[in-house]
């Protein structure tokens, strides 16, 4: 299997899951060359039956594995999706998002064992379907056609969705069990294996759904945000100094600065 598409989900909404799965069955990339791994985490029925009902609508041309765990959290779910997975590349998609028909084809065309392929991103307002400004999409449009070092591509290193990542780059690393920021920490941890980040064609589009229930927009107590930011800062420092000399210091400095910039924004939101 060339690509394994890993989809973590908790108490999925039928319409969102159906659109996500449907966009994968509409891929122009050869269906026999990729599979889908859906991890239902922290819940079971009626969601497991709902997922199977959705899959029954499609033609079975793609191998789909559905896994269930009582342990909640996207980190654990993503780790389960990678564990024992022999695919050459990993692709992570959030269940409430979807992708364009040429998404996997375009990403695969530019990805290599030491390069991460980066898609375009279009954010869509869930309430009315209008497009919303997205910083990753903005950077992609500016940098399309270039090969970027991790330092020059640091703005792309905040999430794992929107990318195609080789198992050589992942190199056995796992997501840390934290509620917010696990994406950026994971990508930064594997940045020492990344030679290039390559923005793929504009027709490789990751559609990011923007809605009030999104984890990143939930109004958590400031104390929880502060504890999360402190823990993230410690984990970044442990990662960097644990393999000092292998990482670009400026990449880590940028990520830590972004952590506390986000905390300041959250303070303003609570004020």
Image (cartoon, rainbow, N blue to C red):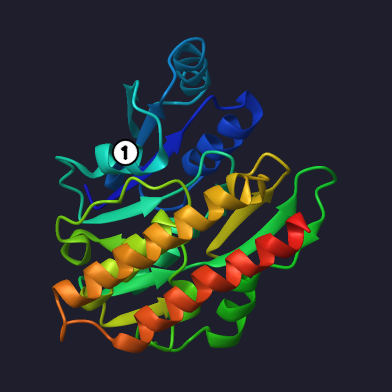
Q: Residue furthest right?
A: 128
Quarter holding residue 80: top left
Q: Position of residue 127 (x, y in %)?
A: 82, 42
Quarter that holds the C terminus:
bottom right
Residue annotated with mark 1: 76
On the image, the x and y values in percent for residue 1 come to: 21, 47
**Where 61 sits versus 259, above or below?**
above
Image check: 76 left or right of 135? left
Q: Residue at x 63, y 72 (%)?
A: 135
| Residue 112 can be seen in this image | no
In this view of the protein, which residue sits in the foreground, 105 or 162? 162
Decide if residue 91 is on the left or right side of residue 143: left
Q: Residue at x 23, y 68 (%)?
A: 238
The residue located at (35%, 44%) in the rendering is 75
Q: Give the side of residue 248 with respect to residue 20, left or right.
A: left
Is residue 154 visible to us here?
yes
How far from the left and from the top, in percent, is residue 226?
A: 52, 57
């Amino acid at each position: 299997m060339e690509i394994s598409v890993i989809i973590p989900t908790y108490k999925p909404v039928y319409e969102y899951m159906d659109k996500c799965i449907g966009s994968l069955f509409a891929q122009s990339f050869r269906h026999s060359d990729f599979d889908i791994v859906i991890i239902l985490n922290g819940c079971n029925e009626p969601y497991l039956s709902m997922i199977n009902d959705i899959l029954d609508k499609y033609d079975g041309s793609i191998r789909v594995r559905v896994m269930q765990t009582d342990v909640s959290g996207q980190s654990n779910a993503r780790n389960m999706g990678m564990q024992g997975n022999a695919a050459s590349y990993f692709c992570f998609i959030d269940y409430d998002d979807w992708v364009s028909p040429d998404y996997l084809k375009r990403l695969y065309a530019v990805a290599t064992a030491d390069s991460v392929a980066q898609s375009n991103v279009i954010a869509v307002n869930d309430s009315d379907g209008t497009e919303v400004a997205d910083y990753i999409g903005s950077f992609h449009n500016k940098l399309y056609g270039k090969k970027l070092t991790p330092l020059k591509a640091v703005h792309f290193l905040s999430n794992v969705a929107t990318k195609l990542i080789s198992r050589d780059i992942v190199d056995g690393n796992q997501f840390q069990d934290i509620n917010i920021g696990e994406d950026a920490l994971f990508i930064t941890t594997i940045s020492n294996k990344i030679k290039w980040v390559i923005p793929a064609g504009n027709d490789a589009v990751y559609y990011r759904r923007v809605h009030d229930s999104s984890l990143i927009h939930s109004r958590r107590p400031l104390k929880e945000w502060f504890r999360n930011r402190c823990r993230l800062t410690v984990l970044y420092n442990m990662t960097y100094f644990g393999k000092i000399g292998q990482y670009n210091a400026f990449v880590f400095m940028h990520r830590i600065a972004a952590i506390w910039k986000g905390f300041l924004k959250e303070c303003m939101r609570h004020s």
